[in-house]
Image (cartoon, rainbow, N blue to C red):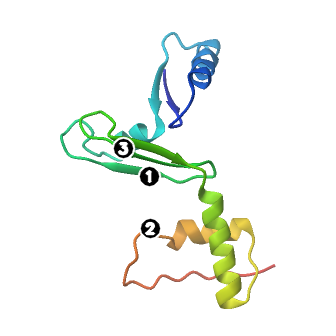
């Protein structure tokens, strides 16, 4: 069984994950850090001598990893996650449009029109209240 673990997971956490998987019936358990699994899943050339950067942003800490040749050059975990991005969207809509939106709406906006890259394209979404 292959199990993803967060960057910076302690040995105690890794052992607990491994034992949980074995307790669920796995004969062999292999651990892989989430950014490496994400890079492989995204089809990045992780076994080549080119660097790839993977950033994972979810409700838990933001994780970043630079990895050439199946190795790690730099790996970091920052205590800011998707919830902080949702808060930023909520504040932006309140400040610029005078409307209050909830976390679910902010999450929808983030997923449907959000981007990490500034661009020339104007993206729009219609948001309705109750």
Q: Quick one: SS at disc 1? A: strand
Q: Are marks 3 and 1 in contact (CB under 8 Å)?
A: no
Q: Position of residue 42 (x, y in %)?
A: 36, 47
Q: Position of residue 34 (x, y in %)?
A: 47, 38
In the orientation shown, which residue stands out farthest toward the bottom?
97
Q: Are marks 1 and 2 in contact (CB under 8 Å)?
A: yes
The residue that label 3 is drawn on is: 39
Task: Decide which of tag 3 and tag 1 comes sooner along the chain.
Answer: 3
Q: Nearer the viewer, residue 1 or 50?
A: 50
**What residue sits 63% from the left and 52% below the top?**
59
Disc 3 from disc 2: Cα separation: 17 Å
Q: Quadrant of the C terminus?
A: bottom right
Q: Position of residue 73 (x, y in %)?
A: 32, 40
The residue that label 2 is drawn on is: 116
Q: Nearer the viewer, residue 67 or 24?
A: 67
Q: Is residue 32 left or right of residue 125?
A: left
Q: Is residue 45 visible?
A: yes
The residue that label 1 is drawn on is: 55
Circle 3 crowding by C-alpha within 10 Å: few under 14, some 14–19, many from 20: some
Circle 2 crowding by C-alpha within 10 Å: few under 14, some 14–19, many from 20: few
Depth-wise, is mark 3 or mark 1 nearer the camera?
Answer: 1
Circle 1 crowding by C-alpha within 10 Å: few under 14, some 14–19, many from 20: some
Q: Is residue 126 left or right of residue 119?
A: right
Say if 67 sits above or below 124 in the image: above
**What residue sits 48% from the left and 82% below the top?**
123
What numbered label is drawn on residue 1?
none
Q: Quick one: SS at disc 3? A: helix
Say if 34 sits above or below 112 in the image: above
Q: Quick one: SS at disc 2? A: loop
């Amino acid at each position: 069984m292959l199990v993803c673990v967060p960057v910076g997971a302690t040995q105690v956490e890794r052992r607990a994950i491994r034992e949980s998987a074995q307790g669920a019936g796995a004969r062999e358990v292999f651990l892989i850090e989430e950014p490496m699994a994400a890079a492989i899943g995204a089809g990045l050339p992780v076994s080549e001598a080119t660097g790839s950067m993977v950033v994972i942003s979810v409700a838990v800490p933001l994780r970043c990893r630079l990895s050439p040749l199946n190795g790690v050059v730099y790996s970091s975990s920052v205590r800011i996650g998707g919830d902080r991005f949702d808060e930023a969207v909520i504040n932006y809509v309140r400040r610029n449009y005078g409307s209050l939106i909830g976390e679910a709406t902010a999450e929808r906006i983030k997923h449907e029109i959000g981007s990490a890259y500034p661009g020339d394209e104007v993206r729009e979404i219609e948001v309705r209240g109750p």
